[in-house]
Amino acid sequence: ENHLNPNYTFDNFIIGKGNQMAHAAALIVSEEPGKLYNPLFFYGGVGLGKTHLMQAIGNKRLEDHPETNVKYVTSEAFTNDFINAIQTNRTEEFRRAYRDVDILMVDDIQFFAQKEGTQEEFFHTFNDLYNNDKQIVLTSDRVPQEIPKLQERLVSRFAWGLPVDITPPDLETRIAILKNKAKLDNLVIPNDTLSYIAGQIDSNVRELEGALSRVQAYSKLKDEPITTDLVYEALRGLKLSQDNRQLSIVDIQNKVASYFHISINDLKGKKRMKSIVMPRQIAMYLSREMTSNSLPKIGKEFGGKDHTTVIHACDKIAEIIKLDADLRKEISDIKSALN
Ligand code: ADP
Ligand code: MG
């Protein structure tokens, strides 16, 4: 009915620097909804615990006060409900469903971008709840001001309460999250192995959990306990697939050609003017430095040149970079554009 995931509780939520404000606000709102922070607005990158924390408010409230009417939806579900209601002449029902609640949570409201009609309806829903001191909790991957085509009046309303950001967990928090997750899953993992995993996966909590499941599956498959060596092997495939998503020679050629405003054909061709030779050598140099392709392979990709030509180009650029600060800067610009 309320669509809450029972595992998304405060008990299962590890507090760290990046989320402690959000956690504290969530706890207060679950104790006194509609009073202090209305709306409560969490924003931050994917997989950092926005949905978890939001639902924890609902779960806690229902545990302490089962009579509370809690409604959780994604912004897409809100949009679909609204469209269906219009198509089936049930807008009254729709309004009751969204306004006869004590806590309304709408997840990922960045997807309200561009949706004029839905924004209009949500504006009225918001006002109705707000005027009746009902709690509104919202999440988004960015601050309201940065959501494209979000009506100004919604942007300003979203800022009335408390916008709090959630930032990625630091190493200690990542270790604590893994420890907690291992305990929940009855996994036996030595501390240094947990630290090793947390050191390898530094993006977000969802990926951290993904890595742990991978390790768990790998240990089952090999029928071996989870050790750092086993983790190393289990995660190696993950790393490789990330590396594979990395740059190709073609990516580098495209970027260098457009940076210097020359054609790909010229870049790969035989013309000897300086305005073309230099970009060509830079592209070879970067292909050598930023990909794992062999010299002959790089030569081949540059119109079938010999590997000694590639070596010459790499040496030449390496030499010039030492002396020429402008070129150094240009190459570093191209590199950051490629990353
Ligand atoms: P978001 O909504 O920000 O994309 P989620 O709430 O879906 O992120 O979190 C992704 C996963 O990570 C979920 O399984 C969630 O339980 C877990 N998670 C995120 N933050 C924490 C935390 N601080 N402690 C424990 N688990 C967390
Ligand atoms: Mg989410």
Image (tube, helix red, strand yellow):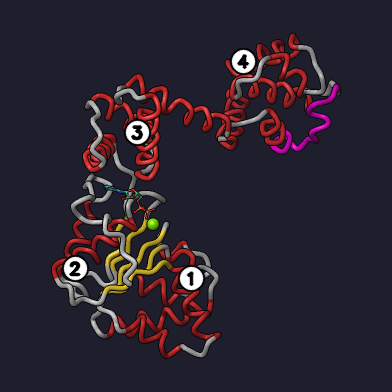
First in sequence: mark 1 vs mark 4: 1
- Distance (Cα) linking label 4 and label 2: 63 Å
Q: Position of residue 105 (x, y in %)?
A: 33, 69
* Residue with the mark numbered 2: 61
First in sequence: mark 4 vs mark 3: 3
Residue type at numbered disc 2: Arg
Of residues 62 and 144, the one drawn nearer to the viewer in this rendering: 62
Q: Position of residue 48 (x, y in %)?
A: 35, 49
**Is 290 drawn above or below residue 110 in the view shown?**
above
- Does 262 appear in magenta? yes
> Residue 219 lies in what quarter of the image?
top left
Residue type at numbered disc 4: Ala
**Regarding mark 2 in the picture, which secondary structure is present there?**
helix
- Distance (Cα) linking label 4 and label 3: 45 Å
Determine whether, in the image, residue 188 is placed left or right of residue 235: left
Q: Can I make out residue 159 in this image? A: no
**Regarding mark 1 in the picture, which secondary structure is present there?**
loop
First in sequence: mark 1 vs mark 2: 2
Q: Are marks 1 and 3 in contact (CB under 8 Å)?
A: no
* Residue with the mark numbered 1: 150
* Residue with the mark numbered 3: 216
**Number of marks in the image?**
4
Which of labels 1 and 4 is toward the front?
Answer: 1
First in sequence: mark 4 vs mark 2: 2
Q: Residues within 10 Å of mark 3 (few under 14, many from 20)?
A: many
- Magenta span: 257-270
Q: Position of residue 62 (x, y in %)?
A: 20, 69
